Image (tube, rainbow, N blue to C red):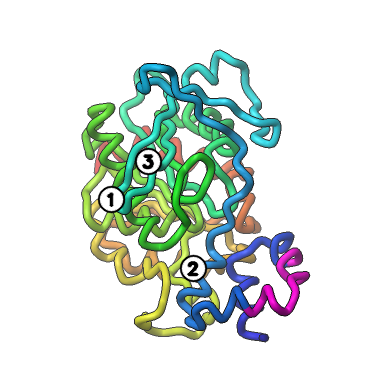
């Protein structure tokens, strides 16, 4: 069971790992033995959808959706800011319906972030962060919930992850008419997986990878040198296909996805820009450091103009 608990440590926060440590033997057997494949185990452990912190209510016409946030969403702004959030549902190629959120933070924003969030939050919990981030870096933000998260149907799997971001990308382009050259693909933690996959297939204004992983097996077993057929989330094999500028952000004391993953991905980029290595930052607090916003502002408002 030692190897299995190593996998747990890699994909879960310390708090969640402690909770998983209290599972019964039968629950552990169900988790690890169905099926007994390391890649599948990693995939299972990578997705931790919380109880939904929001609901979407559709009007009689079926065209307008209203966002209702629960107390657990921890909304930090007024109703005026909430009115700037538009939500809707769209269908993926796998048949799931996923919740999408467009946050209009700035009327004169040149860029829209296509934001793929972390593994233990949903759109409700992220909504305040999106308002704050977008208003500070002068970008609108488009985000979505993975299958099985929030109001989205289906189950969270690696294949669904790729279908989810593809549907979000198409909705952003067709519903809002936003061109690829005005989209910045942003992924955080597990969100870097669909972000890298999409960016490897479509060119955009830029790509931002926040606390990225190279692959599931490389997180669990740091000495892994190649990608095996059962590996999950192989960012390391896809990132060299990205032709857009790539900004990588990683905390040097990341306790979940080691800092070495950010370095390895940076070295494989076709068009890397100056990365942000946040000294002393862990996995879940990078955005609390002042240089996080400073680097994003510089990248969006100055560097992209000249790239």
Q: Is residue 276 visible?
A: no
Q: Is residue 18 above or below residue 6?
A: above
**Cα distance between the residues tagged 3 and 1:** 19 Å
- Kind of element beneath mark 3: strand
Q: Which residues are magenta?
A: 18-29
Work out whether mark 3 precedes mark 2 in sequence or the reverse, and give the earlier one.
2
Q: Residue at x 42, y 71 (%)?
A: 232
Q: Residue at x 53, y 77 (%)?
A: 34
Quadrant of the rendering where the C terminus is positioned: top left
The residue that mark 1 highlights is 93
Quadrant of the rendering where the N terminus is positioned: bottom right
Work out whether mark 1 precedes mark 2 in sequence or the reverse, and give the earlier one.
2
Q: Is residue 236 magenta?
A: no
Q: Nearer the viewer, mark 3 or mark 2?
A: 2
The residue that mark 3 highlights is 114
- For residue 43, the mark is 2
* Residue 144 placement (x, y as % from top left): 43, 41
- Kind of element beneath mark 2: helix
Q: Nearer the viewer, mark 3 or mark 1?
A: 1
Q: Is residue 159 left or right of residue 85?
A: left
């Amino acid at each position: 069971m030692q190897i299995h608990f190593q996998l747990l440590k890699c994909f879960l926060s310390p708090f969640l790992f402690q909770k998983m440590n209290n599972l019964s033997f039968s629950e552990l057997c169900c988790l690890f033995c169905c099926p007994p494949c390391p890649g599948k185990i990693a995939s299972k452990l990578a997705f931790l959808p919380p109880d939904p912190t929001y609901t979407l209510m559709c009007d009689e016409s079926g065209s307008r959706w209203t966002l209702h946030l629960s107390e657990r969403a921890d909304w930090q702004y007024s109703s005026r800011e909430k009115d700037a959030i538009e939500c809707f549902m769209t269908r993926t190629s796998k048949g799931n319906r996923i919740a999408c959120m467009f946050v209009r933070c700035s009327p004169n924003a040149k860029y829209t972030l296509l934001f793929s969030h972390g593994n233990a939050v949903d759109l409700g919990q992220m909504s305040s962060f999106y308002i704050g981030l977008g208003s500070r870096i002068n970008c609108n933000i488009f985000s979505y919930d993975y299958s099985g998260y929030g109001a989205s149907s289906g189950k969270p799997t690696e294949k669904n992850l790729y279908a989810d971001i593809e549907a979000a990308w198409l909705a952003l382009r067709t519903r809002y008419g936003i061109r690829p050259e005005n989209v910045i693909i942003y992924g955080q933690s597990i969100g870097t997986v669909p972000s890298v996959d999409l960016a490897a297939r479509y060119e955009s204004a830029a790509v931002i990878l926040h606390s990225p992983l190279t692959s599931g097996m490389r997180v669990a077993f740091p000495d892994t040198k190649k990608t095996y057929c059962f590996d999950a989330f192989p960012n390391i094999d896809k990132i060299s296909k990205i032709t857009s500028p790539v900004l990588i952000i990683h905390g040097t004391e990341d306790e979940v996805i080691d800092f070495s993953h950010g370095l390895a991905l940076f070295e494989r980029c076709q068009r890397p820009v100056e990365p942000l290595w946040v000294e002393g930052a862990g996995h879940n607090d990078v955005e609390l450091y002042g240089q996080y916003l400073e680097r994003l502002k510089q990248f969006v408002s100055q560097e992209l103009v000249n790239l």
